[in-house]
């Protein structure tokens, strides 16, 4: 049995902070998603300059009389094993966004998905036998044959988590942990009973 679609009116009854103005919140969503992508970058790419490579520092040949360009050492970028000119350096790519921006982005994303009819509700979601095949069947019965499904609940039992950990098309997230990027990424969002109220709290505080 498929899950029931949640309407804007249902969300308002659950005290979800709905962003009704079309112009409001778009920039907040962009800023939050960009920050999340940036925060996942390790920034570990690092090359050595001519001052950091292991080299003798001795002149490879005399200054004059050889007909060759003068060289002060073998650490220059033009030499094999020399330093790298303008190469990447280890850096911190992380970005910060304010709490208010994160809250607005979350509300905007949730509002858009509800408006599009992509947020569904169901009384429960569990897989007692812990099998991936059963898990996939249960998820598809709720959301239909779509590419990606996000299931949000207050908590999941261990058997359900075990059944779903190897099924890439469905992601299990608790209502306290789901983020703006995930709300936008998945084709359908299934909210298990009680999850909408927690999401509502996250849009107002």
Image: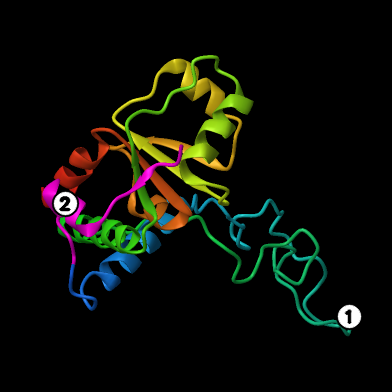
Comes first in the chain, label 1 or label 2: 2
Question: Which colour assignment does the render follow?
Answer: rainbow
Q: Is residue 164 above or below residue 129?
A: below
Magenta highlight on residue 4? yes
Q: Is residue 112 above or below residue 67?
A: above
Q: To which quarter of the image does residue 174 belong?
A: top left
Residue 143 versus residue 168: which sits nearer the camera? 143
Q: Which residue is mark 1?
A: 66
Residue 202 versus residue 95: which sits nearer the camera? 202
**Residue at 36% across, 28% down:** 124
Judge whether residue 137 can be spotted in this image: yes
Judge whether residue 98 can be spotted in this image: no
**Residue at 40% across, 18% down:** 157
Span colored in magenta = 1-19
Residue 170 in percent (x, y) is at 52, 40
**Residue at 60% across, 34% down:** 167
Residue 204 versus residue 31: which sits nearer the camera? 204
Could you tell me how far apart the alpha carbons at marks 1 and 2 are, in whole angstroms? 80 Å
Magenta highlight on residue 167? no
Residue 142 appears left or right of 134:
left
**Residue at 53% across, 60% down:** 89
So how many labels did they put on this image? 2
Q: Which residue is mark 2?
A: 16
Q: Judging from the image, what secondary structure is the residue with disc 1 in?
A: loop
Q: Judging from the image, what secondary structure is the residue with disc 2 in?
A: loop
Q: To which quarter of the image does residue 169 belong?
A: top right
Q: Residue furthest right?
A: 66
Residue 139 in percent (x, y) is at 51, 36
Q: Is residue 71 above or below residue 166?
A: below
Residues tagged 1 and 2 counted as in contact (Cβ below 8 A) = no
């Amino acid at each position: 049995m498929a899950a029931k679609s949640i309407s804007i009116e249902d969300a308002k009854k659950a005290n979800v902070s709905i962003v009704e103005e079309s112009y409001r919140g778009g920039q907040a969503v962009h800023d939050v998603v960009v920050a999340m992508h940036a925060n996942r970058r390790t920034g570990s790419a690092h090359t050595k300059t001519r001052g950091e490579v292991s080299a003798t520092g001795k002149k490879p040949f005399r200054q004059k009389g050889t007909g060759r360009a003068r060289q002060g050492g073998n650490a220059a970028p033009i030499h094999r094993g020399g330093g790298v000119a303008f190469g990447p350096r280890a850096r911190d790519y992380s970005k910060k966004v304010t709490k208010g921006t994160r809250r607005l982005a979350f509300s905007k994303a949730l509002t858009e998905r509800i408006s599009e009819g992509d947020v569904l509700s169901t009384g429960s979601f569990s897989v007692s036998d812990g099998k991936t095949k059963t898990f996939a069947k249960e998820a598809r019965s709720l959301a239909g044959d779509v590419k990606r499904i996000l299931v949000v609940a207050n908590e999941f039992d261990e058997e359900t988590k075990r059944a779903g950990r190897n099924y890439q098309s469905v992601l299990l997230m608790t209502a306290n942990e789901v983020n703006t990027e995930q709300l936008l990424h998945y084709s359908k969002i299934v909210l298990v009973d009680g999850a909408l109220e927690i999401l509502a709290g996250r849009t107002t505080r």
